[in-house]
Image (tube, rainbow, N blue to C red):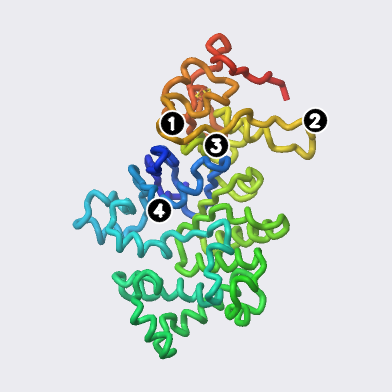
């Protein structure tokens, strides 16, 4: 079995707003193995993107990661911090959250890189695409040469230095080598005529090409873990397929691990080896793709799968999950299973917080976890909560 490159434990992120505390990510656990695509799926507002931002420590105020650990395997880094930060080291793993800020910043690039869902708003419209990729290459190049110099031009390179570099081109922040590497990366992600395209601005790129450019920028640091947050949502269907093919190809060739965040179960089925289903800030079911898709335990997972049209045996009507996602305001969440108000199998035993537990039977026999009492017991209609009606069970 492949080793874990990333072990996320009890990750908890809250937003402290004027309306109150919002529990966006609530005690999330999952592992990402070497060279696998791990999918995180759920409705809008389920906490998927905040989880991704929390992994790379990019949650902005009023949000804050309040608890949890992100263990990343890097034997060299572990040795480096074993004496100075013993609490942040466990064997070959380091808890990224307990490392110094400089080290955490350095890890963005060679350890973790992100592709965001809207490339048009993620790239700077006033800087040629190639230069933006070259800057990412340059930051990594400089950081490797001197890990203390991890800041990009805009993060503290200094106005004075920036002005000097603007007037004296030979002192440009981005070296010729980094420019050449940026062109190579554009070529690598399938941009035609990459030298010419590198000089162009984001508005001169199509949506699909912009997303390819974002992928190129993410590859600049040769990351171990690529976090792709809804990478195809803003694209039309044919371009979506091209970007997914590109991600598969790169993941296999570079042997990267990928965390793929999407609301699209079809994308999960096509791309992932293992999956975590998120609801109201929690991972409610996780396991191999086969276990979760073929043998789901959590009624939310069942509901998601039941709402997919079957092209071979089309049902007259799809079965949507009734109701709405609950408020994530701490004052309104209550001490019960967060899915209880929508769950057709809700019982009295669901009226308390539900811990993660092993699913009763698994297809591949490993690591199928679920936050639901049905992992331990059968549904009992005599204990049904008001309004909860279990769907009829059919043989097919
Ligand atoms: S714990 Fe109860 S309410 Fe929650 S999903 Fe399971 S059966 Fe439904």
Tell me the quarter of the picture where residue 357 sits. Answer: top left
Q: Nearer the viewer, residue 129 or 159?
A: 159
Q: Earlier in the sequence, mark 4 or mark 1?
A: 4
Separation of disc 3 and disc 4 at Cα? 39 Å
The percent coordinates of residue 15 (x first, y second) are 40, 44
Give the answer, above or below, for where 140 lies relative to 51.
below
Density class for disc 2 (Cα within 10 Å; few <14, some 14-19, many ≥20) is few
Q: Nearer the viewer, mark 1 or mark 3?
A: 1
Q: Earlier in the sequence, mark 1 or mark 2?
A: 2
Q: Earlier in the sequence, mark 3 or mark 4?
A: 4
Q: Which mark is residue 40?
A: none
Residue beneath disc 1 = 356
Q: Nearer the viewer, mark 3 or mark 2?
A: 2
Q: Nearer the viewer, mark 2 or mark 4?
A: 4
Residue beneath disc 3 = 364
What SS does tag 2 mark? loop
Q: Earlier in the sequence, mark 3 or mark 2?
A: 2
Decide: marks 3, 4 in contact (CB < 8 A)? no
Residue beneath disc 4 = 60
Q: Which mark is residue 316?
A: 2
Density class for disc 3 (Cα within 10 Å; few <14, some 14-19, many ≥20) is few
Q: Nearer the viewer, mark 4 or mark 1?
A: 4
Which quadrant is home to the C terminus?
Answer: top right
State the residue at coordinates (63%, 45%). Answer: 264
What SS does tag 4 mark? loop
Q: Nearer the viewer, mark 3 or mark 4?
A: 4
């Amino acid at each position: 079995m492949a080793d874990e490159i990333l072990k996320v434990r009890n990750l908890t992120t809250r937003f402290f707003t004027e309306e109150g505390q919002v529990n966006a990510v609530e005690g999330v656990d999952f592992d990402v193995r070497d060279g696998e695509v791990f999918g995180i799926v759920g409705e809008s507002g389920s906490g998927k993107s905040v989880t991704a931002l929390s992994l790379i420590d990019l949650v902005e105020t009023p949000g804050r990661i309040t608890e949890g650990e992100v263990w990343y395997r890097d034997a060299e880094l572990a040795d480096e911090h074993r004496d100075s930060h013993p609490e942040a080291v466990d064997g070959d793993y380091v808890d990224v959250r307990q490392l110094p800020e400089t080290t955490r910043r350095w890890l963005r690039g060679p350890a973790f890189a992100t592709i965001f869902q809207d490339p048009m708003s993620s790239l700077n419209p006033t800087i040629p695409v190639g230069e933006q990729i070259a800057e990412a290459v340059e930051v990594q190049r400089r950081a490797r040469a001197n890990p203390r110099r991890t800041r990009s031009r805009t993060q503290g390179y200094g106005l004075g230095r920036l002005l000097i570099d603007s007037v004296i081109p030979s002192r440009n922040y981005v070296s010729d080598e980094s420019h050449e590497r940026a062109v190579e990366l554009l070529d690598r992600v399938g941009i035609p005529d990459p030298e010419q395209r590198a000089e162009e601005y984001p508005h001169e790129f199509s949506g699909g090409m912009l997303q390819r450019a974002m992928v190129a920028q993410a590859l600049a640091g040769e990351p171990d873990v690529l976090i792709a947050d809804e990478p195809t949502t803003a694209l039309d269907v044919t371009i979506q397929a091209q970007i997914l093919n590109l991600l598969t190809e790169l993941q296999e060739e570079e042997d990267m691990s990928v965390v793929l965040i999407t609301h699209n179960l079809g994308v999960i089925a096509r791309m992932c080896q293992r999956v975590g289903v998120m609801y109201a800030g929690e991972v409610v079911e996780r396991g191999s793709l086969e276990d979760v898709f073929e043998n789901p335990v959590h009624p939310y997972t069942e509901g998601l799968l039941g709402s997919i049209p079957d092209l071979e045996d089309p049902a007259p009507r799809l079965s949507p999950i009734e109701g709405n996602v609950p408020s994530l305001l701490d004052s309104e969440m209550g001490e019960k299973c967060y899915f209880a108000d929508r769950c057709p199998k809700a019982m009295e035993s669901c009226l308390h917080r539900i811990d993660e537990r092993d699913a009763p039977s698994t297809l591949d026999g490993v690591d199928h976890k679920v936050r639901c009492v049905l992992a331990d017991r059968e549904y009992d209609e005599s204990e049904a909560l008001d309004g909860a009606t279990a769907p009829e069970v059919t043989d097919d």
